[in-house]
Image (tube, rainbow, N blue to C red):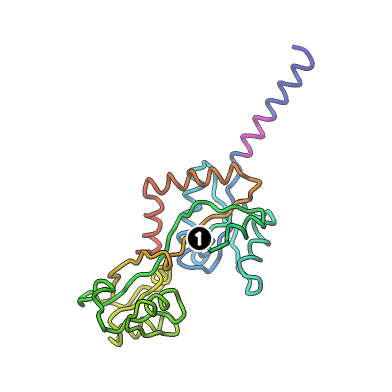
Amino acid sequence: MTKSSAIRTVACALALALSSLVSAAPLTACVVDGNEPFSSSSDGARGLDVDVVQALAAKLGREAKLNWIVVPSRGGMGRALKQSIQAGTCDLFVGLPETEGGGEDLAERGLVASTPYLSVGYVLVAPVAGKVKSLSDLGKAKVGAVTATPADLHLLAGGYNRTPYGNHRQLMDALARGEIAGALVWAGRLADAPPPDGIGVRQVLNEPSLTTRFVIASRRADAALGSAVNQALAALKADGTLDAAARRAGFP
């Protein structure tokens, strides 16, 4: 063996070893703490986004590692992105709501969004023993929503006999007392705070204006990882893993 061929052999061996180390590196994901039912470190790591990270890591053959993030009151999600994934503290940022123009904002940060892994809309909740099973059953009966939310605007635009409330608790209390015949509630909030006994989900509303889709951000420079995440999400959707995780988290 010549000296040059020996050097090439050693170089190839080192490259293979390095490749093995890289592929075995943990998949580090930034998730927001105290963000039930999506992610929380309380009583151990739990929540929908935690399940998604673990399923993704398993599909990619890597160990999942969580980096808990607190979204600052000043700067909000933009600052959280800057201090985490943009700073290189994680490979992925899980749990970003898809917004109009959000792709351009991510691009300016050197980030790209995955295909959506979750769509969360509003649901109509009403007494399970009553006649209200959909919005069309309300007639002139009162229906509530938290004020200034997409649900409240939807009821106003539709000409429903709407009654706005200050927060979710007030809305549920009014429904339990019989002050309103039904209520439009964001499914994410409902998963965290289930309705009172005797009250259940009667209709899931699929209007785009009432739906929020959630994505995962990765660095644009790491195109291979972004592509692998999208492929893994497609597989997890096809085999029912994402739906099962959503049901465990309490989403209807």
Q: Which residue is mark 1?
A: 45
Q: Is residue 16 magenta?
A: yes
Q: Relative to 250, does residue 92 appear above or below in the rendering?
A: above
Q: How many residues crowd mark 1 within 10 Å: few (<14), some (14–19), many (20+)? A: some
Residue shown at 40% from the left, 62% from the top: 249
- Residue 91 is left or right of residue 162, and the answer is right
Placement of the N terminus among the 4 image quadrants: top right
Of residue 149 and residue 94, the one placed in the foreground of this image is 149
Quarter-wise, where is residue 154 in the image?
bottom left
Q: Relative to 207, does residue 24 appear above or below in the rendering?
A: above
- Residue 108 is left or right of residue 240, and the answer is right
Q: Magenta stretch mostly in which secondary structure?
A: helix
Residue shown at 69% from the left, 25% from the top: 12
Task: Identify the secondary structure beneath mark 1.
Answer: loop
Residue shown at 49% from the left, 65% from the top: 43
Image x and y of residue 166, in percent: 45, 85
Q: Relative to 60, does residue 246 appear above or below in the rendering?
A: below
Image x and y of residue 71, in percent: 60, 68
Placement of the C terminus among the 4 image quadrants: bottom left
Of residue 220 and residue 247, the one placed in the foreground of this image is 220
Q: Is residue 250 magenta?
A: no
- Residue 130 is left or right of residue 190, and the answer is left
User: Residue furthest toward the right?
Assistant: 3
Amino acid marked by disc 1: Ala
Query: In the rendered structure, which segment of residues is drawn in magenta?
Result: 15-22
Image x and y of residue 152, in percent: 41, 78
Of residue 219 and residue 41, the one placed in the foreground of this image is 219
Image x and y of residue 236, in percent: 42, 47
Of residue 220 and residue 244, the one placed in the foreground of this image is 220
Residue shown at 63% from the left, 50% from the top: 219
Q: Relative to 166, does residue 215 appear above or below in the rendering?
A: above
Q: How many marks?
A: 1
